[in-house]
Image: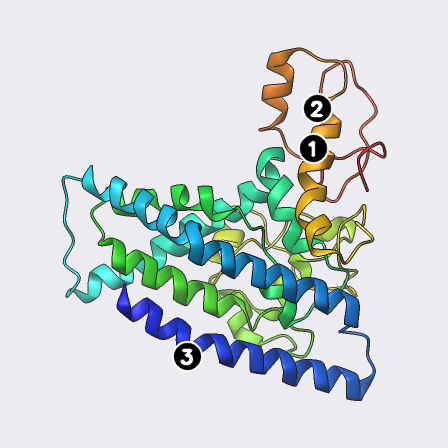
Amino acid sequence: MQMTDDVLKIITPISVGLVVVEAAYSYKKRDGSYEAKDTFGSLVTTLGYQGFRKLALASIFISGLLWAESLSPFAWSASSPWTWVACFFLVDFFYYWDHRLGHETNILWAFHNIHHSSEKFNLAVASRLSWVEELYRWIFLAPLALLGIPVPMIVFMKLLHRIYQVPIHTNYICKLGWLEYFMATPSQHRVHHGRNEHYLDKNYGGVLCIWDRLFNTFEPEDAPVEYGLVKQIHTTNPIKIQLIGPQRLWAELQQPSTGWEKFSYLFKKPGSPLTESIHEMHVEETVPLSESAVS
């Protein structure tokens, strides 16, 4: 894991520097890509995520993978280039499903919506993440460990995967020609963060967009993007940013229903009615939240 720590020591100041440069460029252009309070909310949310990660989440994440590895009858060689190639594609494939389910199940969207809660789109938003997501996200990489891929390799590849996703959170890189056919690009990720109706639930890919094309979730950028949630949170308070998703989900679960209906609702697609007797489908941004939800 030392290699992972060494990469983080290099990448962290570079990422901060890129945010400063992009913010300064935005200020000079006066294009509104950055707003002081929103950026403050993103940065404090990022610091909270990094703090929780170092204190507990990283150990839980790695422990879960080590446990899965202990169950595997296989052992891939870390010295084989084919192991690295397989690890890359598998990390990206399972990230696609991790990300997709984060949008398409109520229980996971309650936390992942934090990343989409900003009405801006910039490098500072890249690490605007839930403080508790890593408690369960290791589960989506457990299949790799069960296959016998070494855990240090999985963690390192996941880090590189995460690093790639930082620079695609920008308005300043246009479409990238032929790369758009197989790589996840800033243009595609702008679509992913859009609240425009035809942009919802699209472009889940992390490094590659081949999974979106294969599973019919790809959408090109063909109109100006309006960022944020369909029902915006209207706050830059870092604590409220973390809590609004769970609060809204809890408010939805208070509607009259059976215990089974409440449990099933956690795994329904956001925007679905809690019970079959509820016929009014409120249009959401993949947020399963009614107007009665806490704002």
Label 1 sits on what residue type?
Answer: Leu
**Marks 1/3: CA distance?**
38 Å
Q: Assign a secondary structure to mark 1.
A: helix
Q: Nearer the viewer, residue 198 or 142?
A: 142
Q: Quadrant of the C terminus?
A: top right
Q: Quadrant of residue 222?
A: bottom right
Q: Residue 262: image x %, image y %?
A: 64, 19
Q: Nearer the viewer, residue 224 or 292?
A: 292
Residue 249 got which mark?
Answer: 1
Residue marked by disc 3: 10
- Residue 100 appearing in the image: yes
Q: Residue at x 60, y 13 (%)?
A: 260
Q: Residue 237: image x %, image y %?
A: 75, 56
In this rendering, the answer to whether 277 lies above or below 174 is: above
**Left or right: residue 137 compared with residue 121:** left
Tell which residue pokes out farthest to the front in this image. Answer: 55
Q: Residues within 10 Å of mark 3 (few under 14, many from 20)?
A: few
First in sequence, mark 1 or 3: give its number. 3
**Marks 2/1: CA distance?**
6 Å
Q: Residue 286: image x %, image y %?
A: 70, 42
Residue 253 got which mark?
Answer: 2
Q: Quadrant of residue 190?
A: bottom right
Label 2 sits on what residue type?
Answer: Leu
Answer yes or no: do the residues labelled 2 and 1 have beta carbons within 8 Å?
yes
Q: Residue at x 73, y 49 (%)?
A: 240
- Residue 286 appearing in the image: no
